[in-house]
């Protein structure tokens, strides 16, 4: 799923004033998801990964920690600037539709929390161009888990504005690769992720979202309601648990 056509996308600019919160408060990805992305590709030390729409490098660093070399492709300068450095991650300015990478240079293309911002036909054509024969594409989302009372209440609050209601569907529905020519072995893996947050982290997590107002009456109301939610849900350690359903969609280039 993607935002409705009435929502302004502007993927290269809309996170510019949210990069710091994004880097500090967005969740990681579970080990099982990274395992699935890399499974069967061989020695990670010999892999070149294109992390497309890399943001502040959350997924890029996870892959680099496994030994891969990662080219993190991110068009937003503020997001690149907010990224924590890693010796095996190189950030470059580029887009999913025009990565700037050479033909058949990558073993793996990863899009973590980013594919919904792309033009799918153009992006997938670019991925096929830069992937080696039988190279893999992996589309990953930390999706909303409404079975968790904390997560359900959180999203009801933060999606209660006109822009929020416009993106009220989950980002990732069915496998976006099913039925798309040029890809084989389409498959998926789902796993869960828990993010424990104190009040600062919960507020920062909300402020990192592109649909969250940064000021005004809706901002003030959402902050108040989130504060009340955190007070209700926090345990003795002062943290509340947000639950995600991590979705991994995989295929290889034909």
Image (spheres, rainbow, N blue to C red):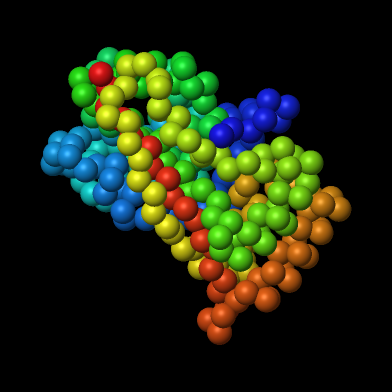
- Measured as percent of width and height from the top left, residue 17 is found at 65, 43
Residue 84 visible in this rendered orientation of the protein: no
Name the residue: 67% across, 76% down: 232
Location of the N terminus (image quadrant): top right
Q: Between residues 204 and 88, which one lies in front from this camera angle?
A: 204
Name the residue: 46% across, 16% down: 122
Residue 174 sits above or below residue 216 on the image: above
Residue 148 sits above or below residue 247 on the image: below
Left or right of 69, for residue 189: right
Residue 242 visible in this rendered orientation of the protein: yes
- Measured as percent of width and height from the top left, residue 191 is found at 39, 54
- Measured as percent of width and height from the top left, residue 236 is found at 56, 84
Left or right of 205, for residue 222: right
Name the residue: 40% across, 22% down: 179
Answer with the quarter of the image where residue 198 lies.
bottom right
Q: Between residues 75 and 179, which one lies in front from this camera angle?
A: 179
């Amino acid at each position: 799923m993607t935002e409705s056509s009435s929502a302004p996308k502007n993927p290269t600019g809309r996170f510019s004033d949210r990069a710091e919160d994004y880097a500090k408060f967005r969740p990681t990805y579970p080990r099982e998801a990274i395992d699935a992305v890399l499974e069967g590709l061989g020695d990670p030390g010999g892999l070149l990964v294109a992390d497309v729409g890399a943001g502040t490098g959350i997924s890029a660093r996870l892959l680099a920690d496994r030994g891969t070399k990662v080219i993190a492709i991110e068009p937003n300068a503020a997001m690149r600037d907010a990224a924590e450095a890693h010796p095996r991650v190189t950030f470059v300015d580029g887009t999913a539709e025009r990565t700037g990478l050479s033909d058949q240079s990558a073993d793996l293309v990863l899009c973590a929390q980013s594919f919904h911002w792309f033009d799918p036909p153009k992006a997938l054509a670019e991925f096929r161009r830069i992937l080696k024969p039988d190279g893999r594409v992996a589309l990953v989302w930390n999706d909303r888990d409404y079975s968790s009372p904390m997560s359900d209440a959180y999203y009801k609050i933060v999606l209660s504005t006109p822009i929020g209601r416009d993106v009220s569907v989950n980002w990732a529905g069915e496998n976006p690769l099913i039925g798309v020519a040029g890809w084989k072995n389409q498959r998926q893996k789902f796993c869960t992720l828990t993010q424990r947050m104190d009040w600062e982290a919960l507020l920062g997590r909300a402020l990192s979202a592109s649909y969250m107002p940064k000021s005004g009456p809706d901002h003030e109301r959402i902050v108040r309601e989130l504060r009340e939610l955190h007070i209700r849900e926090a345990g003795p350690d002062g943290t509340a648990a947000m639950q995600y359903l991590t979705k991994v969609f995989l295929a290889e280039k034909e």
